[in-house]
Image (spheres, rainbow, N blue to C red):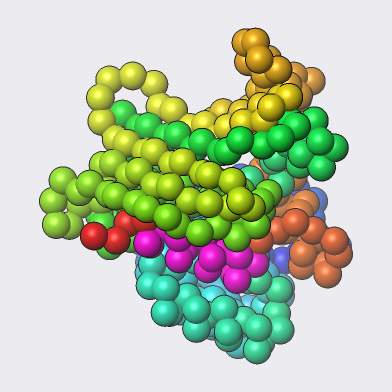
Amino acid sequence: MAHAVSIIGLGVMGQRMLGSMALNAKFNAVSAWDPDADARDLTHGLYPDIRIADSAEDAISGKDTAVVYIACPPVWHKEHAIAAMEAGKAVYCEKPLGIDVAQSRDLVEQARDAGVVNIVNFSLASAAAVTEVEKRLSGGALGDLAGIDVRVHFSQWPREWQMDAADWLSYREQGGFTREVLSHWIYLTERLFGRAELRSAAARYPGDKLSETHVIAELQAGGLPVSVAGSVGGAGPDLVEYTIWGSSQSCRIVDWNRLFTSNGAEWEPQLTHIDDPRQLGYQLQLDNAAAAVDGASHSMPDFADALSVQMLIEDMLAP
């Protein structure tokens, strides 16, 4: 039986989740809410069977709701997550968990006390490329590990498809590519190699209120050096890549879902039998989330995992 879901936040991520859930038999979106009337009207037009709630409280408290998916800007994550937990619902939250570490730490404690399922939507949790990398790491295919490099570049921020959320993604308080993009790769680093430690970091801001344009950082995880570099601006294609360097083989994930390996020569594509790795990733993530809600074996990060990532990210962004 499909898990009935209420969705809070009907922007880019909320709409993407609605589309993915429409293709997945394990979840059924039954209600949704957003403070923006245009977003509510759009959702009603696209999904007329989904009840548009009168408020967030109305969506969360629905008797048929088993899971609350939170896709609003992060400053409101804690408020809606606590309301859902108090109602006894499983909570499926977008990243970052929050922007205030003290508040997120309190949220983690409340989630532990509530005893409800709490998971965070770091998309790499279920990516086929990550599963393959884990297999190669555990099998020793990479040999002795030398380190990890994380590189991202965007010609503009927010990206074109994010412009509807530019009123918060553009600003230092909640937005920026470090929280929105690099957080995924810090999560992956901790998943593969254990909790990371920040050794040094520097961020550049174009103004007091605008989000960062450049970040460099050095971390350590599992005894390995992790170098991070991100930037915004300049003509050229966007870049998102994560490389694990090994003495026998190195692995590189590009654009979230595409895996390449090198034994010393050119990078060779892997998992080429997957026709659409992006769409497969969305469905694998929902299958993984459903397993978490069911109490079955899963690899979804919980609030505590997300807090660990958030602490590192906020330290990277600190003046």
Magenta stretch encompasses residue 268: no
Q: Tell me where residue 60 sits by quadrant.
A: bottom right
Describe residue 104's horizontal placement relative to residue 264 as left or right: left
Magenta stretch encompasses residue 307: yes
Q: Nearer the viewer, residue 242 or 225?
A: 225
Please indicate, yes or no, whether residue 192 appears anywhere in the rendered image: yes
Residue placed at 45% from the left, 66% from the top? 311
Q: Nearer the viewer, residue 129 or 286?
A: 129
Residue placed at 17% from the left, 57% from the top? 209
Q: Nearer the viewer, residue 93 or 154?
A: 154
Residue 65 in picture, x, y percent from top left = 68, 73
Above-or-below relation of 257 to 267: below
Residue placed at 28% from the left, 41% from the top? 214
Above-or-below relation of 208 to 126: below
Residue 61 in picture, x, y percent from top left = 60, 81
Above-or-below relation of 129 to 94: above
Which quarter of the image is occupied by the C terminus?
bottom left
Describe residue 125's horizontal placement relative to residue 242 as left or right: right
Residue placed at 54% from the left, 76% from the top? 81
Magenta span dominant secondary structure: helix
Chain part drawn in magenta = 302-315
Describe residue 298's horizontal placement relative to residue 189 as left or right: right
